[in-house]
């Protein structure tokens, strides 16, 4: 059997997040599909987590000439390069210039990395939402055949649809709480302020995650506790695996960014998706299609939102949980955003690039 060698190269500042999980899903599926894979990225917990799972890695100290040259030398020995935006893309194209190795490039959001200036050097360009694809087509009208939409996916082996007999009553929140997730923190503070003003004491919150902005959330929780004379917010710390799955499957509602929002919807709970582009309320069947177009809060999301409207919707769901929407949400994610479906399409691009 011919060994097919894939190199995935990325640049990021946050130690963990949606981009890293997207790469992990791609890599695991590629290995399962018979590819030999190496991941090149900044040193840190993400690469360490890959090494623990037996995946080949090479740390890249971006800005260091020696480290970047070592990365290029690694890339030239691959059969296909999958690059993500930023300085990682420059290294991928340098390697391609030397040997002609095909490069597939993914655009994740509003920042398109001036793709129109180098799309001629790409084998293919992947956009993770229809909104991004439409914007890319505007700046690359003559290269439409190189552009395609392949969304981020959800690992449905980790999540199962919420039981209709579930009696748990709380809003689930899962996120990092650092400055790049400022919008999540601000929204939670606004929602808790609205709840405090309404003296509403029958809506509880369970918060999974950690980060530098946690003190702001703890302070806002104290304000709600004072207003209602109840401790309505539980901080669970960082959760993954079974803990995160249970958090969603037992909830009545969710507030979550990006991939976490998709995971919450996969178990059938209405969700406020909070992304780099804005905030989108997903609690009706039509919302599912509209939210997917913008990658659930990503590029293309309407900037303005009304906290009072969102809080009113949460209260409505706590009075009556719509099982029809719950089933529709779980089905929508399963039919359109299953990791198996999404990554099969991506690996298909790798195979095409080889020929």
Image: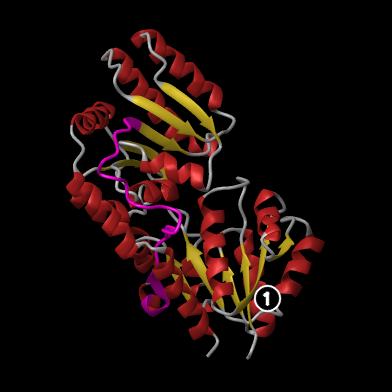
Residue named by callout 1: 95
What stretch of residues is rendered in magenta? 144-170
Q: Is residue 280 visible?
A: no
Residue at x 66%, y 59% (from the top left corner):
50
Check the image and report above or below for 110 versus 246.
Answer: below
Q: Position of residue 267 (x, y in %)?
A: 34, 49
Residue 152 at x, y percent in the picture: 43, 60
Report if residue 160 lies within the magenta region: yes
Quadrant into which the N terminus falls = bottom right
Instruction: Look at the picture and state if 279 lies above or below 126.
Output: above
The spot of residue 39 in percent (x, y) is 66, 65
Query: Does the magenta-highlighted stretch encompass residue 77?
Result: no
Quarter-of-image position of residue 36: bottom right
Q: Quadrant of residue 320?
A: top left
Residue farthest to the front? 165
Q: Secondary structure at mark 1?
A: helix
């Amino acid at each position: 059997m011919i060994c097919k060698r894939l190199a995935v190269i990325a640049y990021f500042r946050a130690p963990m997040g949606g981009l890293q999980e997207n790469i992990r899903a791609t890599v695991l599926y590629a290995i399962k599909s018979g590819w030999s894979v190496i991941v090149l990225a900044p040193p840190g917990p993400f690469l360490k987590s890959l090494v623990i799972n037996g995946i080949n890695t090479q740390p890249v100290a971006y800005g260091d000439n020696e480290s970047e040259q070592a990365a290029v030398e690694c890339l030239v020995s691959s059969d296909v390069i999958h690059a993500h935006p930023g300085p990682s893309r420059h290294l991928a194209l340098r390697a391609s210039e030397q040997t002609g190795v095909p490069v597939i490039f993914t655009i994740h959001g509003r920042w398109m990395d001036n793709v129109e200036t180098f799309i001629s050097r790409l084998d293919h360009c992947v956009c993770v939402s229809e909104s991004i694809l439409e914007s890319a087509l505007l700046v690359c009208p003559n290269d439409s055949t190189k552009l395609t939409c392949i969304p981020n996916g959800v690992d449905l082996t980790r999540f199962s649809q919420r039981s209709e007999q579930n009696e748990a009553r709380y809003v689930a929140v899962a996120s990092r709480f650092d400055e790049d997730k400022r919008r999540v923190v601000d929204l939670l503070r606004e929602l808790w302020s609205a709840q405090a003003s309404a003296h509403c004491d029958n809506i509880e919150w369970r918060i999974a995650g950690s980060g530098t902005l946690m003190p702001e959330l703890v302070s806002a929780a104290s304000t709600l506790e004072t207003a209602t004379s109840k401790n309505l917010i539980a901080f669970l710390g960082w959760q993954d695996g079974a803990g995160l799955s249970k958090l969603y499957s037992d909830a009545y509602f969710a507030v979550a960014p990006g991939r976490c929002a998709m995971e919450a919807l996969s178990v059938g709970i209405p969700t406020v998706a909070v992304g780099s582009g804005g905030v989108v309320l997903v609690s009706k069947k039509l919302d599912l299609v509209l939210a997917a177009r913008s990658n659930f809060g990503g590029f293309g999301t309407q900037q303005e939102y009304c906290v009072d409207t969102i809080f009113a919707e949460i209260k409505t769901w706590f009075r009556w949980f719509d099982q029809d929407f719950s089933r529709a949400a779980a089905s929508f994610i399963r039919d359109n955003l299953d990791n198996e479906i999404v990554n099969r399409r991506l690996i298909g691009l790798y195979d095409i690039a080889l020929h």
